[in-house]
Image: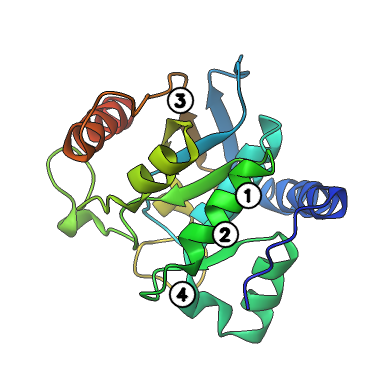
């Protein structure tokens, strides 16, 4: 069952785990934020990112904490089936998604209504290099637009570069950095309004912005 409650304890637990992730992750990689800080008028956002590695969820938790955005992340339901992974995902208040049920959308809307952002990897699965289009992404799933539209909030894309250097897209375990830690770059800055646009137009604008962030 997806937890629907939004309390200060949930945010405190998110921040505690994000701090632990940052400390542990420091051993494997460096993170560069572009820009380092964000000035946002409203933190009720649907935050979206590309997906290249199993490490992305850890990087996302750390990055969201860095920008003071204690978002609930939508994560594929199958990852909750593993006891260790499922327990951790529940501890950081993630929302099971992608199982064909609409409950995840309802919970995302409740989360936004309660004042917290939500975060989604909009390709819905890890995209290995040979499956990426020329712009660096796979097919985008449009469910994030419905959430933003129904909640009346903007979308903020984040481009994640280098995450598959520390955890390969087809690997079960992360790589140990014997000669220096790889650098992960997270690029963001602008938000996208859904007002007055069709779903296809919002998806195209989101993809174009992410493609710009993922360009070398």
Quarter holding the N terminus is: bottom right
Q: Which tag, 4 or 2, sits closer to the chain's start?
A: 2
Q: Which tag, 4 or 1, sits closer to the chain's start?
A: 1
Q: Which residue is mark 2?
A: 107
Q: Which tag, 3 or 4, sits closer to the chain's start?
A: 4
State the separation of the CA atoms marked 4 and 1: 31 Å
Q: Which residue is mark 4?
A: 172
Q: Which mark is residue 79?
A: none
Q: Position of residue 185 (x, y in %)?
A: 48, 33
State the separation of the CA atoms marked 2 and 3: 25 Å
> Which label sits in the foreground, 3 or 1?
1
Quarter holding the C terminus is: top left
Looking at the image, is 112 positioned above or below residue 87? Answer: above
Residue 104: tell me if it is visible. yes
State the separation of the CA atoms marked 3 and 1: 22 Å
Q: Which tag, 2 or 3, sits closer to the chain's start?
A: 2
Which one is in front, 8 or 131?
A: 8
Q: Which residue is mark 1?
A: 111
Secondary structure type for disc 2: helix
Secondary structure type for disc 4: loop
State the separation of the CA atoms marked 4 and 2: 30 Å
Which one is in front, 82 or 173?
A: 82
State the separation of the CA atoms marked 3 and 4: 28 Å
Q: What is the quadrant of residue 130 in the picture? A: bottom left
Q: Which residue is mark 3?
A: 188
Which one is in front, 137 or 117?
A: 117
Q: Residues within 10 Å of mark 3 (few under 14, many from 20)?
A: many
Q: Position of residue 38 (x, y in %)?
A: 60, 18
Q: Which tag, 3 or 1, sits closer to the chain's start?
A: 1
Q: CB under 8 Å between callouts 4 and 2?
A: no
């Amino acid at each position: 069952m997806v937890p629907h409650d939004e309390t200060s304890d949930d945010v405190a637990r998110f921040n505690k785990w994000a701090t632990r992730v940052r400390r542990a992750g420091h051993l494997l990689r460096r993170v560069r934020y572009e820009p380092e800080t964000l000035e946002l008028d409203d933190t009720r956002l649907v935050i979206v990112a590309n997906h290249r590695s199993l490490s992305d969820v850890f990087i996302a938790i750390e990055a969201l904490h860095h920008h003071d955005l204690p978002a609930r992340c939508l994560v594929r339901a199958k990852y909750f089936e593993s006891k260790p992974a499922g327990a951790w995902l529940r501890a950081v208040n993630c929302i099971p998604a992608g199982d064909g049920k609409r409950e995840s959308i309802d919970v995302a809307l409740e989360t936004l209504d309660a004042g917290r952002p939500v975060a989604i990897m909009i390709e819905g699965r890890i995209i290995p290099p040979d499956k990426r289009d020329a712009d660096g992404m796979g097919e985008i799933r449009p469910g994030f637009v419905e959430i933003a539209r129904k909640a009346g909030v903007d979308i903020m894309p984040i481009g994640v570069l280098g995450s598959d250097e520390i955890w390969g897209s087809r690997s079960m375990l992360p790589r140990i950095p014997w000669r220096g830690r790889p650098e992960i770059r997270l690029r963001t800055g602008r938000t996208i309004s859904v007002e007055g646009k069709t779903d296809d137009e919002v998806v195209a604008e989101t993809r174009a912005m992410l493609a710009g962030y993922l360009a070398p």
